[in-house]
Amino acid sequence: MKSEEELKALVKEKYSAIAQQDKETNMSSCCGSGCCSDEVYNIMSDDYSKLQGYNVDADLGLGCGLPTEFAKIKEGDVVIDLGSGAGNDCFVARHFTGEKGKVIGIDFTEAMIAKARSNAEKLGFNNVEFRMGDIEKMPVSSATADVIVSNCVLNLVPNKVNVIKEIYRVLKPGAHFSISDIVLVGELPVKIQQAAEMYAGCVSGAIQKQEYLDIIDKAGFEKITVQQEKAIVIPDDILAAYLSAEEINEFKASQTGIFSVTVYAEKPDSCCQPGCCS
């Protein structure tokens, strides 16, 4: 079993390469991991192209939902995007915040930060910035954000409890998040759990849906709501890189579910517990 630091290094290496790939390559694989399918279609990500603020140069086809569409962003809000990639969700968020708001993208991959900054410069957006950093320890002051969004990123983080705690810290009292992510119902085959490519591909790093919701609840969030949910089907030719034909059949028969969920929750507006608003 790889350590947390080894997993982070793996993700950084993979996503540095993904930053240089085209959208079609990324969309035909598991979050661009490179385990490409002959069945070239959208495995996980939803179509952003009809959303206001969409920019084709920033869309790498890496998401698993449309969190920004569900995030209830208002004009003037401060929005933070975790794992901002080439800036896709940041630019959509900026449409809602307008010039009076501010959007901060956080990513720990230099190639993604460079690409996002280049896209922002081409668009002439002075209120969208991209910061290098680990979302387990965000380079942001406490109680900064009105809204936090993230698209298919937390499943890549080994310590999800730390990220949820950081989200709580960085949100203002009464503020909220909307996050799209991959979760499981049932256990993945061991060979998939251990496959590095499938970790970088967002699948083997996912946790059980109920555990995911419990982490959010235990962090102190309220009004936890699943805004959207859809089943994810991994094509046989991707599974065949890790499983025999018999194992693929057993996996399908097990009724293990891989789901994309978009989860909304609010930080309490006031509290009485020491330190709960920081």
Image (tube, grey):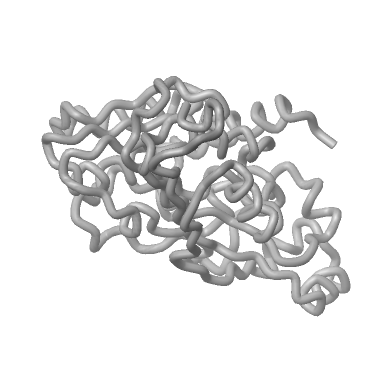
Q: Is residue 185 above or below residue 82?
A: below
Q: In this view, does 135 lie to the left or right of 131?
A: right
Looking at this view, is 166 or 136 the one in front?
166
Give the residue furthest to the front.
272
- Inspect this view and state whether residue 204 appears: yes
Q: Please report the residue visible at 24 percent of the width from the left and 47 percent of the height from the top.
A: 55
Quarter of the view holding residue 123: top left
Q: Is residue 126 left or right of residue 34?
A: left
In the rendering, at what x and y percent does residue 121 appear? Answer: 20, 27
Q: Please report the residue visible at 59 percent of the width from the left and 62 percent of the height from the top.
A: 37
Q: In this view, does 151 lie above or below 259?
A: above
Quarter of the view holding residue 250: bottom right
In the rendering, at what x and y percent does residue 162 appear? Answer: 62, 33
Looking at this view, is 234 or 254 the one in front?
254
Give the residue furthest to the bottom.
253
In the rendering, at what x and y percent does residue 241 appear? Answer: 75, 57
Q: Please report the residue visible at 13 percent of the width from the left and 31 percent of the height from the top.
A: 124
- Inspect this view and state whether residue 62 appears: no
Q: In this view, does 182 lie to the left or right of 83?
A: right
Looking at this view, is 47 or 262 the one in front?
262
How many marks the image carries: the answer is 0
